[in-house]
Amino acid sequence: MCGRYNLVTDAEGLADFFDLVNQIEWRPRYNIAPSQPILAIRPSPAGREGVLMRWGLIPFWAKDAKIGYHTINARAETVDQKPAYRAAFRRRRCLIPATGFYEWRQCGRGKQPYVIRVRGGGLFAFAGLWESWKDPDGGEIESCSIIVTDANEALKPIHDRMPVILDPEVYERWLDPDNEDHRALKGFLRPYPSDRLEMWPVSRRVGNPSFDDPGLIESVPDPSC
């Protein structure tokens, strides 16, 4: 799964990397947690736009927003079949920018967090889905989910799942709402190559979403697990 990630860049860097057509506000974030507003990128008539959405997809048919606490991640294997995600997979796919994500390894009686990023650092994007939901009072909430798949060999000792990281060359095909080649789209949802990632242990403070500072991505001594 993916329950924490970071996006350590500014609005200008995001706009340049993802070729956004709109202006956004963003400050570096080191500990992004479920139910918080996160940045998603989706197509618009003018081009790619960045939009803040709630992390935890609320299907359009949901009776209340609480379902979003259970839909922060969508499994790649069933994303086109599960009622919560299948409509969004057909027409409302998005990119979720990141600079790293966290996973926890069982270590004695506790768990040791690790930060994982593309080798050398920099921006990348998770495969995501988004949805629009109207509450009983007529208000609208836009929300999203990160798609996860099997862990690659490097991550398996830490966790059996990992978020889908998309290569930039497939961004356009992933975002295109008219792309109905669902078989090809699902083919993008595979583990990212181990040799293109790097990771190290970090402070257990990252487990508390109230902490959001550069110290969360600094290396700590690797415990003997």
Image: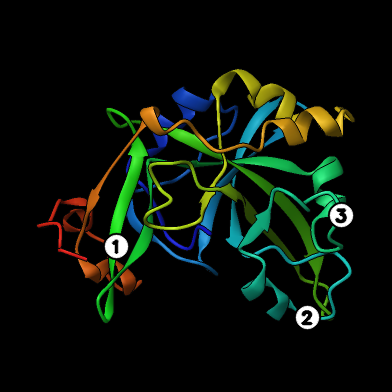
SS at mark 1 in the image: strand
Label 3: which residue? 81
Q: Position of residue 14 (x, y in %)?
A: 44, 33
SS at mark 3 in the image: loop
Looking at numbered disc 2 in the image, what kind of residue is underneath it?
Asp
Q: Are marks 1 and 2 in contact (CB under 8 Å)?
A: no
Looking at numbered disc 3 in the image, what kind of residue is underneath it?
Gln
Q: Which mark is residue 113?
A: 1
Q: Position of residue 196 (x, y in %)?
A: 38, 28
Mark 1–mark 2 Cα distance, whole angstroms, equals: 33 Å
Q: Is residue 135 left or right of residue 197?
A: right
Nearer to us: label 1 or label 2: 1
Seen in the picture, residue 136 relative to 189 is either above or below; the reply is below
Q: Residues within 10 Å of mark 1 (few under 14, many from 20)?
A: many
Quick check: can you spot residue 127? yes
Looking at numbered disc 1 in the image, what kind of residue is underneath it?
Pro
| Image-quadrant location for residue 10 | top left
Q: Which mark is residue 34?
A: none
Q: Which mark is residue 64?
A: 2
Q: Position of residue 194 (x, y in %)?
A: 41, 33
Q: Which residue appears at 27% of the width and 78% of the height?
A: 110
The earlier-in-sequence mark between 2 and 3 is: 2
The earlier-in-sequence mark between 1 and 3 is: 3
Q: Nearer the viewer, residue 209 or 220?
A: 220
Mark 2–mark 3 Cα distance, whole angstroms, equals: 21 Å
Mark 1–mark 3 Cα distance, whole angstroms, equals: 32 Å
